[in-house]
Amino acid sequence: MKYKISLCVSALCFFTAFLIAMSARQQGNEALAARIAPEILRFHILANSDSDEDQQLKMEVKGLVINYVNENLGGNATKEETAGWLMEHRDGIEEMARTYILSQGKDYPVKLELARDYFPTKAYGDMVFPCGTYDAARITIGSGRGHNWWCVLYPPLCYTDSMNAVVPERSKETLKSLIPDEDYEALLPEKERTDHNSGKPRVQVRFRLAELLGLGRDAGDQ
């Protein structure tokens, strides 16, 4: 009986420590997001529903809009210029998306707006952005009740080719110039992080249970 009680107490202590550690990690991620968010513009697109057709349509509209922005905005625009350009061309972007949606047999309205949204932790190619609140260009298709998709519009980290999901080096350099070195390093995969004092890889404690539960990182598009 004493053994069972001891085992239960030990399990409770471990679980409590785990929750405390996860809470600290969450707070650390959100603190990092708060520091880097002023320099970043996310892109957020919400599908009409979770049907296969609407989810596929969301991804096609996403590619259409990203390609249009990349081809017409240029690579030297600042965050403010990117946001301003989107609003100046909002009617045209909405009409382009709606025309495509109609060509696919759906009659959904499209709305583009600037917003502040909470994003979960998300990997973009070889970079990981922490959960937190960011400025975003948000496109809502129809009711907007379906699973959503997001990326980073400035610096331009969005890619449309999922087979070659690598963040452009030029975009990395832009981001690196905008935020402190330690914050930039925190966005890199652990294998790329180094201790600047010793030059050796930084050792971090990772919780296997958190990985098994899928906490702290969103592995794919939504």
Image (spheres, grey):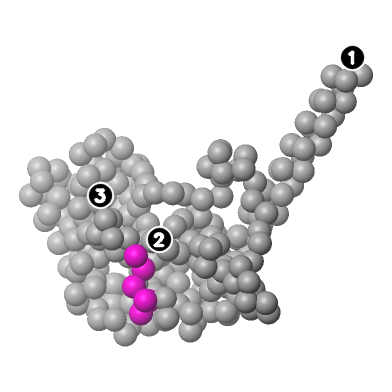
Q: Secondary structure at mark 1?
A: loop
Q: Which mark is residue 124?
A: 2
CA separation in Å, label 1 and label 2: 51 Å
In which quarter of the view is residue 211 placed?
Answer: top right
Horizontal and vertical percent position of residue 74:
25, 81
Residue 195: mark: none
In the image, residue 136 above or below residue 6? below
Is residue 188 part of the magenta span, yes or no? no
Residue that mark 3 sits on: 58
Q: Earlier in the sequence, mark 1 or mark 3?
A: 1
Instruction: State the residue in front, 214 or 28.
Output: 214
Residue drawn 22% across and 44% down? 56
Q: Where in the figure is residue 117, as x and y percent of width and height?
A: 47, 58
Q: SS of the residue at dot 2?
A: strand
Asked if 110 appears above or below 145 in the picture, the reply is: below
Marks 2 & 3, CB-CB < 8 Å contact: no
Q: Earlier in the sequence, mark 1 or mark 2?
A: 1
Residue kind at label 2, given as amino acid type:
Tyr
Residue 4 shows in this picture: yes
Reading the image, the residue beneath label 1 is 1
